[in-house]
Image: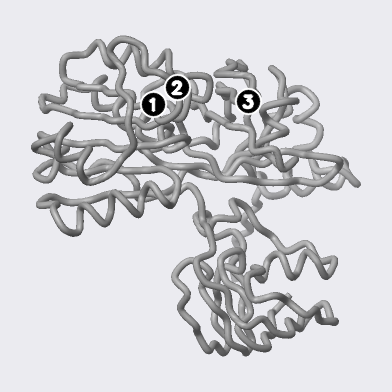
């Protein structure tokens, strides 16, 4: 009998290296030379901090080799260590995929969370973690020849990525972009937008709702009359819109009645429209329970009970907080829909108790 022995040198070396490095992984030693090194997660150094205002910054990032270029309009989950705890939040990428380094543009919210930390404390050289880019707020292929962009506030960031990407290509169509902002000192990416507006393929209009407009800018608020007067052919253009919920509601309502071309939209804020009756939320694995209010998300209820469920954006975008409901009735805090569930997964950041609920936490 002939026995053939195969020796896996690669696997053996890895096991030997890990044993010699105990209690640390070899990756931990490599990180001493470059903290971005990881075989498991996307890490990025902050290469540059560019202040947009006293309440906003654009962070230029230098990620490790695990980063894959995003599609214009997508978002990313950013992780930062705060007080020894990893916290995450979702941000749209404001750079074009062809830019040398990806960027996020962050506005302070005053709640002491990730956004505030990045605006007030982030410095060049700081280390962040990133998720792979995701999201469906992207340009179809081929790109439509006539497009209308309507944005407000932080909704400018994903559209900045989309428009910059289009203008950097051989795009031969025509773009109209109306951005609504309360004041000049709150306007994000203003310098970049003024540069993009020099391209004859883009008709850019800044609309001020608070400040007195400077020459070339407009004053007003978005409503059906503004759209009809300022963009007469708007109903026939493919529409991309992003911004606060009230702004989007106005745009979507107008498009449902007048639009004759596709609509793409992304919400930046998730405001509860309807709370449930509340109820007792039980935690199957952790034990214990808490009485939750109807307008309180299940994520907030779990945190109030001293638990730390995995979560990210807190807006229903990133799906990081998905959790199984063993049994119970919940209410979607955005649509108001009440659902009876049994062994089904939901995003606990956007659902509240509408009766007693048991979570697999």
Res 229 → quadrant: top left
Numbered badge on residue 208 = 1
- Is 16 left, or right, of 225 in this rendering? right
Quadrant location of residue 204?
Answer: top left
Name the one closer to the observer, 1 or 60: 60
Q: Are marks 2 and 3 in contact (CB under 8 Å)?
A: no
x then y, percent, for residue 355? 64, 88
Q: N-terminal of the two: label 2 or label 3?
A: 3
The residue nearer to you, when weighing 354 against 146, is 354
Q: Which quadrant would the C terminus be assigned to in this image? A: bottom right
Whole-percent x, y for residue 218 in the image: 30, 22
Q: In this rendering, which labeled residue sits more in front, label 2 or label 3?
A: 2
> Residue at label 3?
55
> Is 244 left, or right, of 218 in this rendering?
right
> Which residue corresponds to the image point at 10% horizontal and 36% vertical from the top-left?
232
Q: Position of residue 3 (x, y in %)?
A: 61, 65
Marks 3 and 1, the one that precedes in the sequence: 3
Percent x, y of residue 44: 62, 29
């Amino acid at each position: 009998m002939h026995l053939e022995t195969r020796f896996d040198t690669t696997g053996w070396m890895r096991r030997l290296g890990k044993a010699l490095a105990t209690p640390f992984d070899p990756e931990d030693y490599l990180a001493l030379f470059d903290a971005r090194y990881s075989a498991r997660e996307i890490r990025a150094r902050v290469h540059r901090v560019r202040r947009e205002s006293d309440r906003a910054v654009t962070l230029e990032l230098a990620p490790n080799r695990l980063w894959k270029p995003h599609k214009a309009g997508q978002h990313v989950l950013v992780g930062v260590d705060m007080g020894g705890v990893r916290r995450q939040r979702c941000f749209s990428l404001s750079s074009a995929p062809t830019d040398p380094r990806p960027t996020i543009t962050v506005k302070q919210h005053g709640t002491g969370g990730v956004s505030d930390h990045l605006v007030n404390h982030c410095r060049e050289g700081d280390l962040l973690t990133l998720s792979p880019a995701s999201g469906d707020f992207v340009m179809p292929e081929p790109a439509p020849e006539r497009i209308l962009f309507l944005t407000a506030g932080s909704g400018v960031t994903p559209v900045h990525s989309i428009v910059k990407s289009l203008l950097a290509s051989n795009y031969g169509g025509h773009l109209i972009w109306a951005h609504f902002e309360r004041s000049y000192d709150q306007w994000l990416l203003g310098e970049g937008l003024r540069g993009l507006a020099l391209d004859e393929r883009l008709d850019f209009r800044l609309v001020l709702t608070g400040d007195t407009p400077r020459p070339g800018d407009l004053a007003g608020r978005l409503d059906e009359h503004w759209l009809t007067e300022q963009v007469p052919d708007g109903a026939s253009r493919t529409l991309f819109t992003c911004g606060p919920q009230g702004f989007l509601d106005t745009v979507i309502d107008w498009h449902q009645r007048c639009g004759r071309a596709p609509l793409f939209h992304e919400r930046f804020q998730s405001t509860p429209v309807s709370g449930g009756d509340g109820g007792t939320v039980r935690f199957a694995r952790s034990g214990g329970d808490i009485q939750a209010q109807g307008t309180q998300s299940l994520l907030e209820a779990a945190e109030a009970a001293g638990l730390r469920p995995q979560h990210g954006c807190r807006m229903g975008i990133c799906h990081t907080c998905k959790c199984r409901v063993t049994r119970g009735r919940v209410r979607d805090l955005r649509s108001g829909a009440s659902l009876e569930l049994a062994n089904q997964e939901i995003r606990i950041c956007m659902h509240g108790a509408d009766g007693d609920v048991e979570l697999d936490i």
